[in-house]
Image: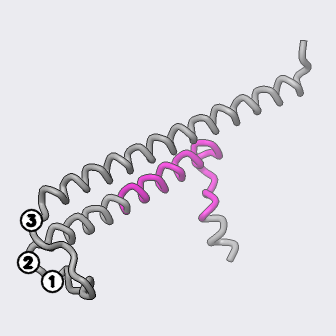
Amino acid sequence: MYDTAKRVALVKQRVWENTRRRQRRGIYRLSTACMLLCTVLMQAAGMIIGKGQTATRGVFGTMLLREDAGGYVLVAIVSFAAAVVITVLCFRLRIRENQKKDGADKPNRYEQEETSQ
């Protein structure tokens, strides 16, 4: 039989392993979601962007001024907005997990850094 200190150490190690495994799964899920989003946006770009000359030598900056380049701009804006939303959700999820782990009455790490400066 283990003594109390050894059991506590084993439980802490198991909790750490489970937390790490859960974080790794979250990273895999987010990576998969990003890849799917990228694929969908590329397919949407193919359908939205009209047929025409898409490459001109020396005038790459003026490509956005063409009539059928609106699809590229739309896909870029949607991609940026999706990335912002995913980033905000990840930060909020991390803050919520930190609050659950540390207790709701304790300020999170970012607030502690701001108050110490």
Quarter of the C terminus within the rendering: bottom right
- What residue is shown at x 65% (from left), y 46% (from top)? 102
- The kind of residue on which mark 1 rests is Leu
Q: Which mark is residue 67?
A: 2
Q: Is residue 67 left or right of residue 42?
A: left
Crowding at label 3, few (<14), some or many (≥20) Cα neighbours within 10 Å?
few
| In the displayed structure image, the side of residue 5 where residue 85 appears, left or right | left
Between residues 25 and 63, which one lies in front from this camera angle?
Answer: 63
Residue at 62% of width from left, 45% of height from top? 103
Q: Which residue is mark 1?
A: 65
The residue range painted magenta reads: 84-110
Q: Which one is nearer the viewer's eye here, 68 or 93?
A: 68
Q: Which residue is mark 3?
A: 51
The amino acid at mark 2 is Glu
What is the residue that sits farthest to the top in this orientation? Answer: 1
Give the secondary structure at mark 2. Answer: helix
Lower position in the chain sequence, tag 3 or tag 1: 3
Q: Position of residue 39 (x, y in %)?
A: 29, 50
Q: Is residue 61 above or below residue 46?
A: below
